[in-house]
Image (cartoon, helix red, strand yellow):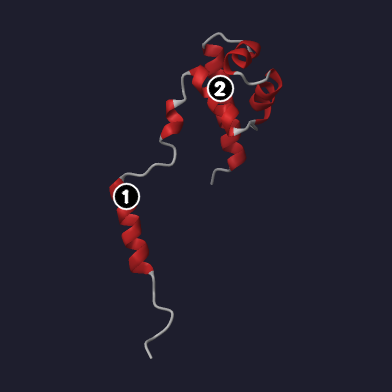
Amino acid sequence: MITPWEIQKHIAKQAKEKRLSLNFSQQTLADRSGVSFGVLKKFEQTGKIALESLLKIALVLGTLEEFKDLFTQTKLEHLASLDELLKSKKRKRGRK
């Protein structure tokens, strides 16, 4: 099972690779995104960053759209899971 820490590091690595592919220095990305240089540097080293700062960086790197559908489900998937939930509920008490 993958851990949140592994995901953080993976996202930071991908962001750094994207920054380098655009030939941006850390300072350039910090200036363009409005995120401080220190926050960006810490993000690339540790993966730790506030969501708002991550989204600002993603905007400059051209990857913001990828966040839009992060937690969406299709309506059918949602309805199917609701049906399963309703069917799985068992009565806790009998009738008097």
Residue drawn at point x = 62 percent, y = 13 percent: 31
- Looking at the rendered structure, the number of numbered marks drawn on it comes to 2
Residue annotated with mark 1? 77
SS label for mark 1: helix
The amino acid beneath tag 1 is: Glu
Which residue of the protein is positioned furthest toward the left in this rendering? 76
Residue 60 x, y percent position in the rendering: 52, 17
Q: CA distance from mark 1 to mark 2?
A: 32 Å
Residue 54 x, y percent position in the rendering: 57, 28
Which residue of the protein is positioned furthest toward the bottom in this rendering? 96
Residue annotated with mark 2? 57
Residue 6 x, y percent position in the rendering: 59, 37
Q: Quadrant of residue 93?
A: bottom left
Q: Is residue 91 above or below residue 45?
A: below
Q: Is residue 54 left or right of residue 68?
A: right
The amino acid beneath tag 2 is: Ile
Residue drawn at point x = 28 percent, y = 49 percent: 76
Of residues 9 and 93, the one drawn nearer to the viewer in this rendering: 93
Query: Could you tell me if residue 4 is visible in this image?
Result: yes
SS label for mark 2: helix
Q: Could you tell which of marks 1 and 2 lies nearer the N-terminus?
A: 2
Residue drawn at point x = 35 percent, y = 65 percent: 86
Q: Is residue 72 above or below residue 24?
A: below
